[in-house]
Amino acid sequence: AALLAGDPAAAPPPPPVHLFSDPAEVEALRGNLLSWYDRCKRDLPWRALAATEPDADRRGYAVWVSEIMLQQTQVATVIDYYNRWMQKWPTLQALAQASLEEVNELWAGLGYYSRGKRLQEAARKVVSELAGRMPRTAEDLQKLLPGVGRYTAGAIASISYGQATGVVDGNVIRVLCRLRCIGADSSSLAVIDQLWDMANVLVDRSRPGDFNQALMELGATVCVPKAPLCGECPVKQHCRARCRKLFGNPPPVPDVEDCGVGDCPLCPPATEPWDSSLGVTNFPRKAAKKPPRVMRTATCVLERRGCHGTLEYLIVQRPSSGLLPGLWEFPSVPLAQDLQEKEREVLADHLQAWMGQPVAAKGLQFIGEVIHIFSHIHQTYVVYSLPLDGDVTLDPALSPSRWVTEDEFHASAVSTAMKKV
Ligand code: SF4
């Protein structure tokens, strides 16, 4: 509207080289991609449910769970978690009745733990406030369900309810940037907006869910980050990055001479236009990531002999918000920069407050260090152990705690980092 009104501040439309403006080409691309998907798609449990579940709310729920699990996690890892989850909580109502503890136990090892918690909170909301009825459009899903962003809403609406709406995830970003030679920072708002517009133009009107899954599947299996299989690609004849690789720069498409020389918001920076050794992997490009936060945490494995002589270990529960919410861990204390020299003393003080009895720093045996990379934190656990002779009475006013055997530890809601410890 701003453009039509002649608003001088409105951005001009991107040059045609970056767009899908020919309806015949769009039609051909949809057909090629969908027939490839029909032949080559992976058999995945959530796809089977989306295709066969007659109940619309159950279908939407099944896709929702898969989409949340697949965020930041590989398909191969998700399958087993997904099957166990759906067996345990086949409906929104079943999930709404679960405890956070049960959710965390099932989620243990999948990472990004707040996902499970948020999913369960949202299920409760659908049951209590929406009478158990899943919203049917991307707009409503995003508006009404906590933790459901634009991508997840589009995926649920297109796959479960046939809404002709596009999706943009990491795989789609890569494929579209290559198809249309988009080399500006792919995490910038200008590029992301453009890609959403493009995804909405491209999505097949009669099979939107399959089309979106096909585009993501192409990115996951053919148009992969490092060594894409362009020879096998079903949309190679529509790919301008490949065209540029084969025929050099500029590619033989109309109007391209206007692009890449000025300040096109979608072209690579003028200083690094095209590296011929990279070929199609010139696209996409990302601004350098912020380095992760570096943290050091002292942790203590307290052990005792249980009644049958089996070794038992003390675990305590983390707060229900923040990093790893509600998960269990060995008693741990983050170390401030200036206290890293004194980590043994800091840990002894922390344990003393717990146990209500003096703990000699000298008694803590240093075991080793464990490094774990969370998405944005480079965490080092400095691991100590402390064997106890008698029993200890833990202060009930502090976080919940319990003694567990090694097997019980592994079955508890503990993070992968703690399993490494
Ligand atoms: Fe990706 Fe290559 Fe296909 Fe282009 S031709 S979309 S770069 S796999």
Image: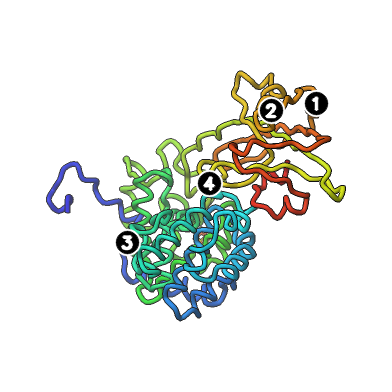
* Mark 2 neighbour class, 10 Å CA radius: few under 14, some 14 to 19, many 20 or more: some
Choose the circle earlier in sequence order: 2 or 1.
2
Q: Nearer the viewer, mark 3 or mark 2?
A: 2
Separation of disc 2 and disc 1 at Cα?
12 Å
Query: Residue visible at 36% across and 45% down?
Result: 189
* C-alpha distance separating marks 2 and 4: 62 Å
The quarter of the rendered structure image containing the N terminus is bottom left
| Marks 3 and 1, how far apart at CA | 59 Å
Of helix, strand and loop, which one carries label 1? Answer: helix
Amino acid type, callout 3: Glu
Q: Nearer the viewer, residue 213 or 76?
A: 76
Number of numbered markers: 4
Q: Provide the residue designation for mark 3.
A: 139
Q: Which mark is residue 193?
A: none
Q: Which residue is denoted by mark 1 in the rendering?
A: 363
Camera-side mark, 2 or 4? 2
Kind of residue indicated by mark 2: Gln
**Front of the two marks 2 and 1:** 2
Ligand 1 under 8 Å from disc 3 Cβ: no
Q: Position of residue 284 (x, y in %)?
A: 47, 49
Which callout, 3 or 2, points at the residue further toward the start of the chain? 3
Amino acid type at image mark 4: Ser
Q: Which residue is mark 4?
A: 276
Q: Nearer the viewer, mark 3 or mark 4?
A: 3
Distance from Cα at disc 3 to Cα at disc 2 = 52 Å
Return the residue at label 2: 352
Residue 138 drawn at (x, y percent): 35, 63
At label 1, the amino acid type is Gly
Contact flag, marks 3 and 1 (Cβ < 8 Å): no
